[in-house]
Image (cartoon, rainbow, N blue to C red):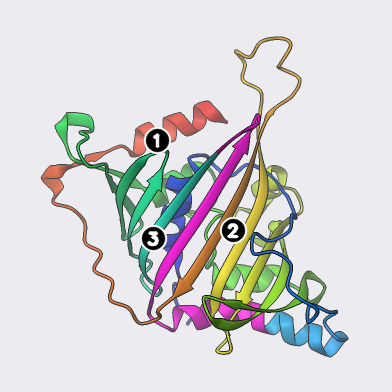
């Protein structure tokens, strides 16, 4: 039986940091870490390519088998000449999917937890609905409302789904590179969106393929994963006539780094009396944006 992998924690961070439902098509841009050196040659033939495909397919389960890890996520959203960067730092239970993290964006720091696929957030000094200090969003419910079978495309650990969606022609070895002092092998991957959960709808939204870059350590575990895409939001019905022909485009880059496997993760839901359920409001806002 496959492990649950890094499901909810990764979904939660993607959900809050992106601030949008992922709709649009992939953008296969160069990785943020830059091009590796001369070792970044061709994969060396069909045998090497098959070996690389097997390594990428197995990486998510091998990472989950490590139990826990520290996680750093950096996201950049760019649109209309402006950009917003968000940085998250914390720890993740790779099997259960729970996480604890501090997220910094636009001058604010947010305390964040993901427990049993429910996202909890607290902004120091701010109150939410009913004077509560924490807000929560049921990630599974929110994702299902978008027709993606309880998961978002931003989840980097859909082990079975990614394994099914990746073939030999979809994986290219780029080269070797050190990530936080650890030797890794860098692969460029193209995922068949139609093979992912909710793929029929996702293919319409994202295009045929989802481009990724992954860096695996000598144990076959993920040390870094990068996803680049262009989010295309349909023109609003209230848009001005001169702008209605062109949908808004947001370029999104998400880079996730994993380290310190085996670290302690203490993810607990806040006391119920301090929490306001904002799931329906988040879903309503998402529908308005789409």
Q: Which residue is mark 1?
A: 282
Residue beneath the point at 57% across and 42% down:
77
Answer left or right for 283 relative to 110. Answer: right
Q: Which residue is mark 3?
A: 89
Magenta stretch holds residue 62: yes
100 or 146, nearer to the observer: 100
Q: Label 2: few (<14), some or many (≥20) within 10 Å?
A: some
Answer left or right for 205 relative to 60. Answer: right
Q: Is residue 119 above or below residue 21?
A: below
Residue beneath the point at 13% across and 51% down:
271
Q: Which residue is mark 2?
A: 197
Magenta stretch holds residue 9: no
Q: Label 3: few (<14), some or many (≥20) within 10 Å?
A: some
Q: Quadrant of residue 81?
A: top right
Q: Which residues are magenta?
A: 55-83
Secondary structure, mark 2, is: loop
| Distance (Cα) linking label 3 and label 2 | 28 Å
């Amino acid at each position: 039986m496959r492990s649950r992998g890094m499901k909810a924690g990764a979904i939660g961070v993607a959900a809050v940091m992106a601030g949008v439902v992922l709709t649009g098509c992939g953008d296969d841009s160069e990785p943020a870490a830059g091009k590796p050196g001369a070792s970044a040659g061709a994969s060396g033939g069909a045998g090497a390519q098959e070996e690389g495909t097997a390594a990428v397919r197995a990486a998510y389960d091998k990472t989950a088998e490590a139990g826990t890890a520290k996680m750093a996520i950096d996201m950049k959203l760019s649109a209309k000449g402006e950009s917003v960067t968000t940085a998250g730092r914390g720890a993740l239970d790779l099997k259960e999917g729970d996480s604890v993290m501090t997220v910094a964006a636009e001058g604010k720091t947010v305390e964040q937890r993901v427990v049993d696929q429910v996202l909890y957030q607290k902004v120091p000094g701010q109150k939410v609905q009913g004077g509560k200090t924490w807000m929560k969003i049921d990630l599974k419910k929110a994702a299902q409302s978008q027709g993606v079978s309880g998961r978002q495309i931003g989840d980097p650990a859909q082990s079975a789904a990614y394994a099914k969606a990746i073939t030999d022609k979809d994986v290219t070895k780029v080269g070797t590179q050190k990530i936080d002092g650890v030797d890794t092998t860098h692969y460029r991957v193209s995922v068949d969106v139609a093979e992912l959960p909710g793929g029929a709808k996702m293919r319409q939204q994202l295009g045929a393929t989802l481009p990724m870059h992954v860096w695996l350590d000598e144990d076959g575990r993920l040390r870094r994963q990068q996803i680049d895409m262009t989010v295309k939001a349909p023109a609003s019905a209230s848009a001005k006539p001169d702008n209605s022909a062109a949908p808004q485009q947001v370029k999104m880059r998400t880079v996730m780094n994993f380290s310190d496997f085996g670290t302690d993760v203490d993810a607990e839901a806040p006391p119920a009396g301090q929490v306001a359920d904002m799931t329906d409001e988040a879903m309503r806002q998402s529908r308005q944006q789409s």
